[in-house]
Image (cartoon, grey):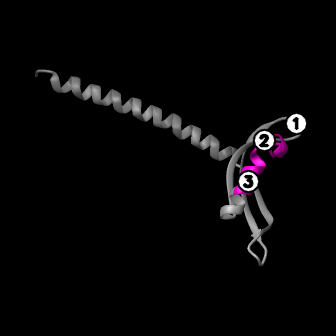
Amino acid sequence: MFPDLHESDLLKEILEKLSYNHTFNSQYNGRISDGTVFPVQITMSGILDQDGSLSGVICIFSDISRLKKSENKLRELKKILLATRMNLLALIKVSSSLVI
C-alpha cells in the first residue's frame, strides 16, 4: 500500500521531517492487492529516547476516499455557483439598462 521507500527520496524526506519536528504528514495513493488505487493520509510521529534522539515511529494510515470525493464535489459546486453568480450579474446589468 505504501510507496516503495527505496526507489524514491521519500524515506529521506520522512526521516528529515521526523528528526526536525518529530512529525510527518502527507497524502499518497495507496494500492490494495487487487490493484485498486485509493487516497491515503499518512501521519507519523517520532518517538524520542531519553537523549532526545529518534528511536521509533508511530504511523497511522487513513483511507481518505470520502474526503477526496467531498472535496471534488465542493469544487464542482463552486464552479456552478460562480457561473450562476456571473449569469445573475449579467441579468441585473441588462435589466437595469432597460427603459420602462
User: Split into 4 quadrants, where in the image is the C terminus?
Assistant: top left
Q: Amino acid at mark 3?
A: Ile
Residue 99 picture quarter:
top left
Whether the residues at callouts 3 and 2 have beta carbons within 8 Å, the answer is no
Report the disc number at residue 34. Answer: 1
Residue ID for mark 2: 8
Mark on residue 14?
Answer: 3
- Amino acid found under the numbered disc labelled 2: Ser
Please report the residue visible at 76 percent of the width from the left and 76 percent of the height from the top: 51
**The magenta stretch spans which residues?**
1-16
Q: Are marks 1 and 2 in contact (CB under 8 Å)?
A: no
Q: Nearer the viewer, mark 1 or mark 2?
A: 2
Left or right: 73 with respect to 64? left
Q: Mark 3 falls on what kind of element?
A: helix
| Coordinates of residue 70 in the picture (x, y in percent) | 59, 43
- Magenta-colored segment: predominant secondary structure: helix
Identified at 63% across, 47% down, the residue is 67
Q: Residue furthest right?
A: 33
| Residue sitting farthest toward the left | 100
* Of pointers 1 and 2, the one earlier in the residue sequence: 2
Image quadrant containing the N terminus: top right
Q: Is residue 11 magenta?
A: yes
